[in-house]
Amino acid sequence: MIRNRISRLLTEMGKGIYEKETDMALALLAALSGESIILLGPPGTAKSMVARRLKSCFKDARGFEYLMSRFSTPDEIFGPVSISLLKTSDRYERVIEGYLPTADVVFLDEIWKAGPAIQNTLLTVINEKTFRNGDHEISLPLKLLVAASNELPTKGEGLEALWDRFVIRLESRSISRDDNFRKMLEATTNDDHDITVANPITSDEYAQWSRQICQVVIPDSVFACLFSIKRSLQSVKIDADENRTIYVSDRRWKNIARLLRTSAFMHDRNAVSPTDLLFVHHCLWQEPEERDSLRSMVIRAVFEPLSIQLATLKSQLNADIRSHRANPLHVQQHDYSAEIDTLADSISCEEKAVAAHLLISADDKQSVADYLKEMYKALAFTRQDLMKLDY
């Protein structure tokens, strides 16, 4: 079972670090999807450790890490130019061994400080997994590129294309819970290093999984949610005084579809479920303050069919109550008690699916629970209204 395999990998990767479950899970999702992820946050919040731990998930994987500065050169990232080839064969090629082009997992810190020569090359690296070395193009073994920064890209400096390539965007935060903070301080070992997992993903498995992910179906119910989310992006309520239009490129939507297929595959399903959409707000925001509003918007879209069923049920019941008051002999056509039970079971089933989902954060699960709690209340009031009918 793929789900059990993924769950064990995430458990092993999380040993010795705290409150990084979502970072690890979504980074692994990005790796299996062939996408990239960016972590925004202050120094010292274990951003680099996410990349190191992810490397351990893949058998014999090679890593590359670099801290960018405005003085960084392409030689430091992609390898120095071969002087011998330049002299003997008049060929301009880089010695790429040990640099980004030969790595499976890459971590680039302070990504926005890199110069245009590096950033422009990264566009092709991330999007097409290729690198032009001299007069020939090579395919890269790259599975995951993790970028990090403590700031958003500066507007007006041509960074929009690179920012758009990072499909998953996460805020990396310090430890918030006192018990976890204490455990970190009490630990006497340094966990900031590579670990060994029991059953890493082999290259053959990775290639096979990638082919199987392509076969995962996106059903009409999920497309309906995606259409609803896309329309809602035209006006996202940020606060009481501000609504924003949030732009998501067609390329990002295509990449999001790949993430959804991968999410379903990771849970042993051959079709995407609407609950797979509940992490998608991490793919939509342009600025962190938009995240919470987008999360609420996605939750509403995912559970909209249940909300419509509830609203329809209440409307029908109210109509029958009015008819009954006007004519006590009126015969209602619905078994409302059974319909309420069926709807409650559907909500409960969705709630359990969310609770068991490997990629939905604890905060997101709590937001879903709060939303469904209101639906349960509405069902309870609807059941009370049944007393207004005489059977």
Image: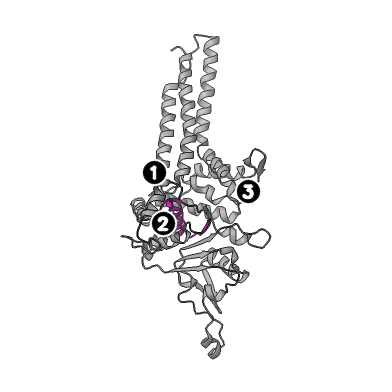
| 99 w.r.t. 39: above or below | below
In the image, is residue 26 part of the stretch drawn in magenta? yes
> Label 2: how many residues lie within 10 Å, few (<14), some (14-19) or many (20+)?
some
Farthest residue to the left: give it: 198
- Of the two numbered discs 1 and 3 on the same chain, state the one appearing first in sequence: 3
Q: Is residue 84 left or right of residue 265?
A: right
First in sequence, mark 3 or 2: give its number: 2
**Residue 258 in view in this figure:** yes
Residue 281 versus residue 100 in the image, above or below: above
Q: Marks 2/1: CA distance?
A: 22 Å
Give the magenta-colored segment's residue range.
Answer: 17-43
Which corner quadrant of the image does residue 69 belong to? bottom right
| Location of residue 389 in the rendering, given as x and y in whole percent from the top left corner | 47, 14
Residue furthest to the right in view is: 156
Q: Residue furthest bottom?
A: 88
Residue drawn 51% across the image and 65% down it: 108
Residue that badge 3 annotates: 246
Q: Give the crowd class for mark 3: few <14, some 14-19, many >=20 residues within 10 Å.
A: some
Q: Residues within 10 Å of mark 1 (few under 14, many from 20)?
A: few
Task: Please name the amino acid that badge 1 sits on.
Answer: Ala
At horizontal 53% and vertical 10% (from top left) the residue drawn is 325
- Which numbered disc, 2 or 1, marks the residue that appears first in the sequence? 2
The mark tally for this picture is 3
Q: What's the distance in space between the residues labelled 3 and 2, CA to CA?
A: 32 Å
> Which of 183 and 308 lies nearest the eye of the viewer?
183
Query: Which mark, by number, is residue 212?
Result: 2
- Position above or below: 9 against 64: above
- Which of these two is toward me, 185 or 85? 185
Q: Which residue is mark 1?
A: 356
Using the numbered discs, state the Cα–Cα distance from disc 1 to disc 3 in whole angstroms.
Answer: 30 Å
Residue 82 in percent (x, y) is at: 52, 83
Q: What residue is rendered at 59% in x and 47% in y?
A: 289
